[in-house]
Image: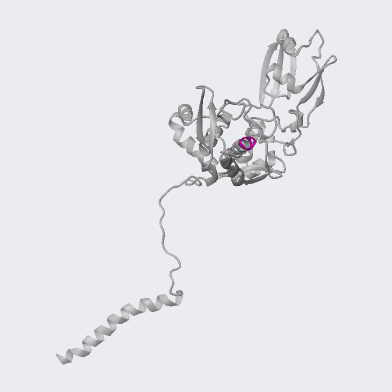
Amino acid sequence: MKKFKPLILLASFLFALTLLIPAILVLPFGDGKVSGKLGEDLSTKAPNTENTSSADAAVEVAVYRSSVGQIDNVPLEEYLVGVVAAEMPVEFKEEALKAQALTARTYIVKKMLSKDNIGVPEGAQVTDTQIHQVYLSKEQMRNNWGMEFESNYAKILSAVRATSGQILTYDGQAIDASFFSTSNGYTENSEDYWNNEMPYLRSVSSPWDKNSPKFNSVKEVTVNQFESALGVKVGASGTIGKIVERTAGKRVAKVDFNGKVLSGKEIREKLDLRSSDFDWERKGNSIVITTRGFGHGVGMSQYGANGMAAAGKNYQEIVKHYYQGIEVTSADSMIATITAQK
């Protein structure tokens, strides 16, 4: 048996060597510490939809549901989804939806801080109408969207969560984040439509709106209806009023009807026009009115925002275009104040 001992020793040596060589080859390329490992993630998570901000989660909004006459206490995030769903087409680009979410959060935070409940039933903070912000419940969204409810809801929720805890401020204060559907190519200075001059609500160009289906509209009224609504006489003259002033946003500021001067805003409201950028002509016993744009024109144009998003602009670039000199800032301290007031 002794003559086999060298062979056994040799076999043992070779076996040990086969174990040692791989280790020798690996050691020069590492420091002996684990610095990484092979991971695996087969999920398809949508961005920013797994967690809500603690600030948003801490607040509820008391919404007066006008159709049923009751008050619903809605978590802030759910309220914002309902507002964006009601105020902007879900087909719009995600960056435009994010911009709309920012305006919605800014509005409600500012309103809750001011404790302004004028015109709101006791116990409520806002209504679900255009008086404040239009709001849709999940049930209403489901009825509107049918089979597309899940995907549409997820899209808007993602936009709300992407801006979670953020609002629009000017000099550290929440702004009046007004918006409207479609411009005539320019937005308005606030004082050209409302009484107050606000430094961030300045007239800016908005060329993207020309692609909006609401850019042009035509309305026909009888001469009698026109005269009655405006309190003027058309007569047989070839000229029906004369525009004597325009706004910075290229809309009608004033029209002179043989000494009676009406503002473009007055004419728009009395004739129920889509915009205060208008002209008209008489055809027989009718007056045909053509308007450009849809809405008051102050603040963010929704179709303009969508056009900017389609051109590759992000939501911060969009809001900073339509609201001059503003910042996108954290609302945590303001929301903490609202929570402490309860």
Residue shown at 76% from the left, 34% from the top: 197
**On screen, 44 above or below 200?**
below
Q: Main secondary structure of the magenta part?
A: helix
- Image quarter of the N terminus: bottom left
Q: How many marks?
A: 0
Which is more toward the observer, 306 or 197?
197
Where, by quadrant of the figure, is residue 210 drawn? top right
Q: Residue furthest bottom?
A: 2
Q: Nearer the viewer, residue 301 or 26?
A: 301
Which residue reaches farthest right? Answer: 259
Location of residue 15 in the rendering, given as x and y in whole percent from the top left corner: 28, 80
Q: Which quadrant of the figure has residue 302?
A: top right
Instruction: Work out whether residue 313 can be spotted.
Output: no
Q: Quadrant of the C terminus?
A: top right
Q: Where is residue 290 drawn, in percent x and y?
A: 70, 20
Of residues 60 and 292, which is closer to you in this image? 60
Q: Is residue 251 above or below residue 224?
A: below
Residue 79 % position (x, y)? 53, 35
The residue depicted at 64 percent of the width and 39 percent of the height is: 308
Does the magenta segment cover residue 174?
no
Apparent side of residue 64 relative to residue 218 in the rendered image (left or right)? left
The answer to whether one can see residue 131 in this image is: yes
Answer left or right for 239 relative to 63: right
Residue in the picture at 51% in, 42% down: 57
Q: Position of residue 182 (x, y in %)?
A: 65, 30
Q: How is the image coloured?
A: one colour
Vertical side of 182 occupied by 321: above or below: below
| Residues shaded magenta | 110-114
Above or below — where is 121 with respect to 158? above
